[in-house]
Amino acid sequence: METAEGQRPARILIVDDSQTNRRLLEVALTRRGYQTISAEDGEQAIEMVHAHNPDLILLDVMMPRKDGYQVCAELKGDPRFAEIPIIFLSALSEAANRVHGLELGAADYVSKPFNIAEVAARAKTQIQLSMLTRDLRRSNAELLARQIQLEQDLKAARDIQSSLLPRSKAIAEPWVKLDWCFEPCDSVGGDFFNVFWLDAEHLGIYIVDVCGHGVPAAMVTVAVSRSMSADSGCSVHRSPDGKYRIASPAEVLRRLDSEYPMERFGKFLTIVYLVLNCKTHQLLFSCGGHPPPLVVRAGGAIENLNRGGTIIGLGGGLPFDEGLIQLDPGDRVFLHSDGVIERENSNEELFGQDRLARELCATRNESLPAACERLTHQVNTFARGAPPTDDFTVCGLELQGTMEG
């Protein structure tokens, strides 16, 4: 019988002060494919274990110098040999003797005079159990190592994704106030947003939701964020002579639809892209299959920015259009992911777009950070402890003043 590694037969140490018993067991077990080594007393048994590290020990109890119970206790107390299964072979057949041997850590107890076939069968069982235990521990150790590696990979992905978020909520002050709440459902998520300057007067704002969660979705958000950067050629078209033209939201969505077909990553994405002129307060927008942003006017009126088209990834099959609105100081625009309006409570009710609009209107006299914080609290309160099943993102901007010049 081979060991788990398949490199050698299982090695059995036979410990008995009777030469006859030792010889009998050696012959019988060797015929069954085992390697055998022998010791005639407890002291020699300990030496043999240290020298050969057997796969199983057949151990007599009553021996000179050191009895079997002492040998068992010593080996079970040594982490190097504690897992070696021990079968006692003894003429002490009283229940108390058996119990004592098992309490010391022995795997089995066979009374003398023993039956060779029975000893061989019990030895085979204990060796197989020991091999399975080692295999299980090895598998668990490998799984643990993979889990640690996965957690490290997730942390790296989370750090990469976080590094691409706006570095400061004051990026557009004093003309535009910004605040947001970003809570991935997993360690990393499929939601992503950014606010960035296209030039000295125009601000680009977008929110992306890649279908799915975890590392694959997060890596697509990283790719999209690179495509959306001001120097990528997607949001700003530059010519060799240094001139440039800011791409309209509809143009950007068409470009993304071409660059990210579903067959490329096996995923589609939705997006809202806004271009704000900080001088004229005009806001161009387009929605690619994403929940439309909400405009909360300073006077309390609310509007849906629902112009655009379908999801990104269909490869140019359907057109994208765009809308244009005029903002005034005090007006707010809120971008959000479907993880907000599709958050369920324990009754499987959705938070919904109408409830979102009411909550945003109710906070129009509060500061923008307070409004975002309250909305997050209201959504979590509505869920009544039900765990989120999607990423949660809200990004709000408030027009505060007019850029001069």
Image: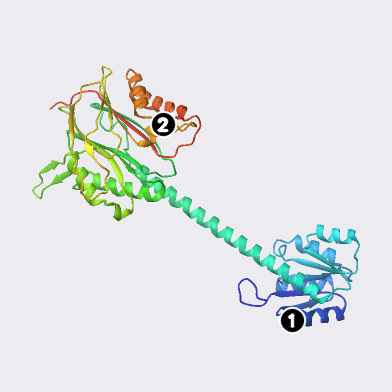
Query: Which residue lies at the image location 44% right of the left edge and 52% below the top edge?
Result: 153
Asked which secondary structure carries label 2, the reply is: loop
Q: Nearer the viewer, residue 140 or 272?
A: 272
Quarter of the rendering occupied by the C terminus = top left
Q: Amino acid at mark 2?
A: Leu
Taking the view exactly as shown, the residue that stands out farthest to the left is: 241
Asked which secondary structure carries label 1, the reply is: helix
Query: Which residue lies at the image location 68% right of the left edge and 76% below the top edge?
Result: 1
Q: CA distance from mark 2 to mark 1?
A: 71 Å
- The answer to whether 233 appears left or right of 361 in the picture is left
Q: Residues within 10 Å of mark 2 (few under 14, many from 20)?
A: some
Query: Residue 155 at what x, y percent from top left?
Result: 44, 48
Please tell me in which quadrant of the rendered image residue 71 appears: bottom right
Q: Which residue is mark 1?
A: 30
Sequence-earlier tag: 2 or 1: 1
Residue 351 in the image: above or below residue 198? above
Query: Residue 394 at what x, y percent from top left?
Result: 35, 32
Query: Which residue lies at the image location 32% right of the left edge and 34% below the top edge?
Result: 168
Q: Which residue is mark 2?
A: 350
- The answer to whether 350 appears left or right of 67 in the picture is left
Please tell me in which quadrant of the rendered image residue 121 appears: bottom right
- The answer to whether 156 appears left or right of 294 in the picture is right
Query: Residue 404 at what x, y percent from top left?
Result: 15, 26
